[in-house]
Image (cartoon, rainbow, N blue to C red):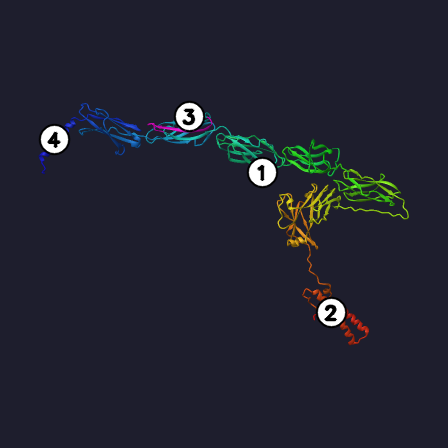
Amino acid sequence: MKFNKEVFITYSILLVLFATMVVAVGFDSVTVVTPLSNDNISGNTLFNVTVANPDGLANATNATFSLLDFNTGLLVYNVSVNPDDPDNLTFNATIDTVLLLPDGQYNLSVAVSNSTGTTQVVNDSITNITVDNSAPEVVLYKPAEGENFSSGIENFDVTVNDVTTDVDSVLFNITNGTADTVFIANNLAGSDDWYFTIDIGSYNEGVQTWTVLANDSLLNQNDTESITFTIDRTAPIVNLENANKTTFTSSTPTLGFNFSDALFSVANCSILFDADILWTNDSTVNDTSTNFTLNPLIDGNSYNYYVNCSDGSQNVGQSETNVFIIDTLSPSVTSINFPAEGANLSSGTQLFDATVNDDGVGIDTVTFNLTNGSAIVQLSTTAIGADYNASWDMSLINEGSQTMTVEANDSLGQVNGSESVTFLVDRTAPNVTILNSSISGTDTTPTVTFNFSDALFSQASCTLYLDGTSYGSNTTTLNDTNTDITVNSALAAAAYTAEVNCTDGSSNVGNSSTISVTVTAASSSSSSSSSSSSSGGGGGLGSSAGVTSSSSNYHKEIWTSIDEADAVVIEIDNDDLAITEVSFDALDTMWGPWIKVEIKEFEELPSSVGEVAGIAHSYLDVSTSTTLENELIENVAIEFQVALTWLEENSLAASEVQLYHFADDATSWEALETSHTSSDSDNAFYTASTPGFSYFAVAEGTSSSLVVEVEESATVEEIELEDTVVTSEPEDSDSEEVMEEGLAEEETKSGSGLGTLLLLVGLGVIVFGIYALYNRAKGHHSKPKKN
């Protein structure tokens, strides 16, 4: 198709005419109502535009709101809206500036168009609109987090800054969880600093929270910044856990305390001992027992201490001051005044007395304990100064050896019960028996045989009486032993009544029944007779002789007393007991002691005693009286024997036997140093040292040998013939027989040679005789010659 110039010109003219007509019917004006220039906006903001159309010919149908960056002119956000009224004169757009517009400055442009497409553009007078959706920034300077206050005036300081708009107001809110106090902060002119001065004394104690409320001109508020601080005017309460402890029985006592504080979990606590800081802990835990053990203190001295604790607010609490003394010693029993050691108290009311002292807290009670090993009598004492005494009717105490132990207690419960004495209660006289039924004869100094028995004494002083006159005595008569007393001066021919009286160690006198003694006049054909008895018993050097009792399975020895330094030897002649002798040295005097050696089956031993290792020969119990204690003896030795048949049956050498000891407080058998001293054709004999008496076992073990093993010596004949030419002995078992035959042959040869010499030489009889004697002597002292 060709271009038609005339048509183009015609259409152009028509278009211009149409446009002119549209303009002729356009809007009078478009006005932005909100926002206005220099407005500050925040959040959801209403953008409003009105159209002026007085002729009513315009038909505005659309408005576009465009927000341009104030500094760059770039479009940030636009939105198109329809009219909000029937006349199409009002256009509104609500814009969420928080979501759609960053904080900053903007210019607003609004374009309104009609249905014909003709557009009316608003002018550029709406400029510098500020969008601010951010709260001010807050920095708290004073006080610091966790700071503590007790009283006084304190400044609370912050800085508040808003980069977009101005800070409008700053509030300080202080709360302790129950009540809020709000203050309007002051601004330091020309700065971002805000402050307020607070009187701490007007606030309750406790943890406080300070929150800052900062608002800008658009009411954007920052209320997230806060700190806590503590107001505390109350010191910790400190308690001594040993406050009522005025005396310690340890030289290194432990001091205890605790503190309580309503606000702080720990405190800085110190123990001040005699005004000096002895111990400090800056993290002592609240409401918890805290203990500290002192270094050794001097006994008898007085000390004082207290504890102070400082909490996080520097409030200091102090305990009371406690004064105490150190007393580690029990009372001292200076002396037992009555009875004396070994005294005999058999009757009447006796006054027991001891002197007791205490240099510490003082005596609380003193008790005298009387015991004979089975029954105990406790005597309460009366104090007269340092002397304590008590009376007791001796008829209420059983007979026998008694021990009075002084038990002294101080007020701390420290007891001295180590001091004691032994005394004897004996109200029973010896039982005396004369063994002669009667005596009759011409003997003017007859002998009376008797014995006595006494439960407590091993000997007595006995006297023979004829018609009431003493005719002899034996002051050391042994208990239960037949004893003779011979009349010590000649009797006239007459009839007499005889009796024997024995006085024991308690001065109790026992009388025998009487017998008749008749002395007749002597005649030339008369004869006299006498009788004798032997006495025996055990004992040691210087000790009062012992009384022996024994059976097939035990041997018991009883003494009246054993003196200090006595060397006591007890010989036991009982093939059923392995032990043959017990010996020891006394370190102190002992009254009424006894010792018993008894063979035991293993099952009869206490359950705490186990079987001895190795092959057991026998178990023995060596028991003693309470007065014969292991602490009172030394150099204790036990000799024992073991049958060679037993050794052979168990394939043991004599050196493979040992003595074992099981002490009362032990948990196992102790092997004692044992020596094999000798052997005979039936038994091997041993000796062993022991620290004391208790349970023993003879069993397989190791013993050193004191037996010198001597090889069989050369026979007498070999020694006498050692100068001969024979240098070796016969090697077979009949060497002794060969030797005897050799000697006989030599003698035969020597005799034959002598006869030959006499015939050949022809010497004189005297010369030949001398020669023969010489060779005969030589023949007897020479060894047999080899054939």
Q: Which residue is mark 3?
A: 180
Q: Are marks 2 and 3 in contact (CB under 8 Å)?
A: no
- The location of residue 630, given as percent across then percent down, is 68, 44
SS at mark 4 in the image = helix
Q: Which residue is mark 4?
A: 14
How packed mark 4 is, by other alpha carbons closer than 10 Å (few <14, some 14-19, many 20 or more), is few
Residue range corresponding to the magenta coloring: 204-221
Which amino acid type is marked by label 4?
Answer: Leu
SS at mark 1 in the image = loop
Q: Nearer the viewer, residue 646 or 417?
A: 646
Q: Quadrant of residue 189?
A: top left
SS at mark 3 in the image = strand
Going from N to C along the chain, the mark reached first, 3 or 4, is 4
Going from N to C along the chain, the mark reached first, 4 or 2, is 4
Which amino acid type is marked by label 1?
Answer: Asn
Disc 2 versus disc 3: nearer the observer: 2
